[in-house]
Amino acid sequence: MAVRIRLKMMGRKHRPFFRLCAVDARKPRDGRVLEELGIYDPMVPDTDARAILKGDRIDYWLGVGAIPSPKAQVLIKKYGTNGTNLEAQEAALAKLKNKPRYVASAEKAVISMTAPAPEEAAPAAAEGEAPAAEAEAPAEAAE
């Protein structure tokens, strides 16, 4: 199967929104995807805050022979794992936190791409509580 990394168009009329996806090359532009690898919102005013990508998954698909489209190649070069604009992207996303209109969509995208699954988060929280309880016990014994 020939895999391509390309943009899938979402959004509505006069408000485009794209998802960067790994797709079978024989499928249509907005057809079924193998995996979603990031988002690209050209309507965000700050250029460096427009794309949010999953660098590790993009590296995997490129490693197994996926071929990016020209626009996807530009986004990967700028905002991929070793991207040329990563520092500018972090600064732009931090700057957007002051603007409530774009914060919701940008933060949701970042959180959904980086947050662990709910099953993984619960044991981590339980482990975090245990050392704190043990730390208080010696302090009480010392008094």
Image (tube, grey):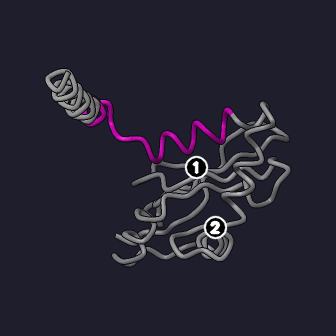
| Whole-percent x, y for residue 19 in the image | 59, 51
Q: Secondary structure of the magenta portion, mostly?
A: helix
Amino acid type, label 1: Asp
* Number of marks: 2
Helix, strand or loop status at disc 2:
helix
Q: Quadrant of residue 79?
A: bottom right
Q: Which residue is mark 2?
A: 86
Q: Quadrant of residue 133?
A: top left
Residue at screen point 73% across, 39% down: 97
- Mark 1 burial class by Cα count in 10 Å: few <14, some 14-19, many 20+: some
Horizontal side, residue 63 vs residue 100: left or right: left
Residue at screen point 42% across, 41% down: 115
Which range is magenta? 104-121
| Whole-percent x, y for residue 23 in the image | 46, 60
Q: In this view of the protein, which residue sits in the foreground, 82 or 37?
A: 82
Q: Quadrant of the C terminus?
A: top left
| Whole-percent x, y for residue 126 in the image | 22, 28
Amino acid type, label 2: Leu
Horizontal side, residue 77 vs residue 59: left or right: right
Residue at screen point 59% across, 71% down: 76
Rendered position, 138 above or below 42: above
Residue 30: which numbered mark, if any? Answer: 1
Q: In this view of the protein, which residue sits in the foreground, 136 or 113?
A: 136
